[in-house]
Amino acid sequence: MQKMIVPTVVMMALLAVGIYGVSQVSADDLSSYPPIVERLADKFGLNVADVEEVFIQERSEHHEMMRQTIEERLNQAVADGKITEEQKNALLAKRDEMQAEREAEREEHRAKMQRWFEDQGIDPEVLAQYGGFAGGFKRGVHMGYMTGSSN
């Protein structure tokens, strides 16, 4: 039975991570796991943290593949004489810097929203089941799919 469950979970996770990765929403998971992680764990009787770890690992691998693709394209631009090796390295460094800044901004926004919810006496976990306003701060919506953050 587990031989069927694990490949199914992995395939569903890959599909969800694909949707999740494309969205780039990473909107701010205030205190729980994304719904897809919870659903998979519940459906197959798995540990939620283990399922989330698969998502995190897949997301990390996806980001690394994207970086490699960009680096290959820049290598071609160097080979074609369009930019220098130094310019390529500067572009890659700037890309990494901008990603780090975006991550810091997301974390800052997450903390700010958590404080706001606390100041208002609102439990975002309770409101999340109703969607709408609280869900907008907790999770992003992309192409009709709910996405959460797991960094």
Image (cartoon, grey):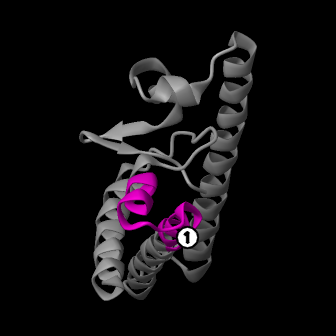
Q: Is residue 56 in the magenta section? A: yes
**110 left or right, relative to 42:** right
The three-letter amino acid code for the residue at tag 1 is Asp
| Of residues 53 and 8, the one drawn nearer to the viewer in this rendering | 8
Vertically, is 72 above or below 120? below
Determine which quarter of the picture holds residue 106.
top right
Q: Residue at x 38, y 61 (%)?
A: 40
Quarter of the image where one finds residue 90: bottom right
Q: Residue at x 37, y 67 (%)?
A: 44
Q: Residue at x 73, y 20 (%)?
A: 118
Considering depth in this image, is 121 or 132 the residue closer to the camera? 121
| Above or below 89: residue 102 | above
Left or right, residue 125 beside residue 16:
right
Looking at the magenta stretch, what is its main secondary structure? helix
Quadrant of the image for the C terminus?
bottom right
Q: Which residue bears the numbered disc 1?
A: 50
Pick the quarter of the image with the N terminus. bottom left
Span shown in magenta: 37-57
What residue is at 48 percent from the left and 76 percent from the top? 61
How far from the left and from the top, in percent, is residue 22? 35, 56
